[in-house]
Image (cartoon, coloured by chain):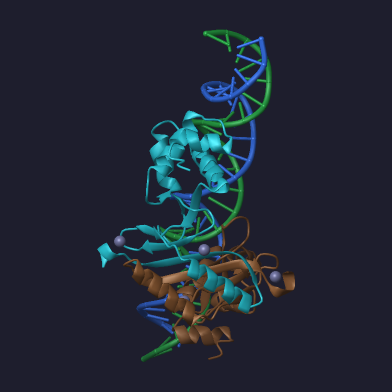
Chain colours: A brown, B cyan, C green, D blue
Amino acid sequence: MSLRSASAVLDRLDLRSTSARRAVITAVLSRSQPVTARELVARLARRGIGRATVFRTLDLLVRAGVLSRIHGIEGGERCFHYTRCAPEHHHHLVCRACGKVEEIDARRLDARLDSVARGHGFRALSHAVEIQGLCQDCH
Amino acid sequence: MSLRSASAVLDRLDLRSTSARRAVITAVLSRSQPVTARELVARLARRGIGRATVFRTLDLLVRAGVLSRIHGIEGGERCFHYTRCAPEHHHHLVCRACGKVEEIDARRLDARLDSVARGHGFRALSHAVEIQGLCQDCH
DNA sequence: GCGACATTTGAGACTGAGTATCAGGAAGGG
DNA sequence: CCCTTCCTGATACTCAGTCTCAAATGTCGC
Ligand SMILES: [Zn+2]
Ligand SMILES: [Zn+2]
Ligand SMILES: [Zn+2]
Ligand SMILES: [Zn+2]
């Protein structure tokens, strides 16, 4: 359950354990805060890791459910942020001041969303919830 | 309250009523479905209206609260869609098959979101909800 | 109507995130 | 080791959105 080491992640996903991938995974998992692709690209470029590899690896991890990709608050809504995250859910509280992100564990919210969709004749396949505001420390 | 005519919108916003602006506003307001910036740019280019003007005008309208900008389902999450929309709310049901978007009027959902945020020590400033799925016609 | 003036416009160059390509390089099974 | 397969990074590319600036246009007082 740990997935703390990069190799463990790669092992679990049946991907070759290359040094580039390990570096990307370590870089992103070592952060408790979400990181932008840009920052990762810049940081890893110094170690000779190419832009494409960073994006490819992040993509793999998002698709495998290890990371979650959320909308950052950097310069409008442009760039994505990546963070370690439970795969099935995309519910976040984002602090506008310090950028801290907390996951919401709200099954009741999920149920409510599904019922709202059903009420409109939709079959819900996925949903995303993002609440922006101020965290306790930043009030 | 109508804001049905482009000139009325411009008048209300204290902006010069130019033919380019009227065309952009008419184009976007005549749709009940959200439109991508790309499509508007393409369509209006045929009338000699430049890319920059389209973006500028959409921006003005979003900031003035006449339009709402939502994340489309076109090729990942790349491009924005614009639609006439109550400014304070961003709750949408998006059909993955036909692209239809319905607005959710869910004050109860709002209240629930606020209370979730409060439960985490956050003061909620805004929130966004997007449910993706299949609409009645596309099941 | 007309002219002065500020605002707006559109062509085109630019930015920056993300993608496609592909020859060379590394991983891993035998 | 060796061979096959998968991975990598350099590079070029795409494409949404922004910036710039000279030319065009709306507004308003006359
Ligand atoms: Zn959920
Ligand atoms: Zn904070
Ligand atoms: Zn709401
Ligand atoms: Zn549909």
User: On the image, which quarter does residue A78 sit in?
Assistant: bottom right
| Residue situated in front as seen by the camera: A30 or C30 | A30
Q: From the top left corner, tell me how far across and down residue A31 is, in percent.
A: 65, 77
Q: Is residue B75 left or right of residue A51?
A: left
| In the image, farthest residue toward the front | B1
Q: Residue at x 52, y 39 (%)?
A: B52
Q: Quadrant of the C terminus of chain A?
A: bottom right
Q: From the top left corner, tell me how far across and down residue B50 is, in percent.
A: 48, 35
Q: Residue at x 38, y 58 (%)?
A: B101
Would you say residue A53 is visible in this rendering? Answer: no
Would you say residue B38 is visible in this rendering? Answer: yes
| Residue situated in front as seen by the camera: B61 or C24 | B61
| Residue situated in front as seen by the camera: A133 or A89 | A133
Q: Is residue A18 above or below residue C6?
A: below
Q: From the top left corner, tell me how far across and down residue A37 is, in percent.
A: 58, 65
User: On the image, which quarter does residue B59 sit in?
Assistant: top right
| Residue situated in front as seen by the camera: A123 or A34 | A123
Q: From the top left corner, tell me how far across and down residue A62 is, in percent.
A: 48, 74
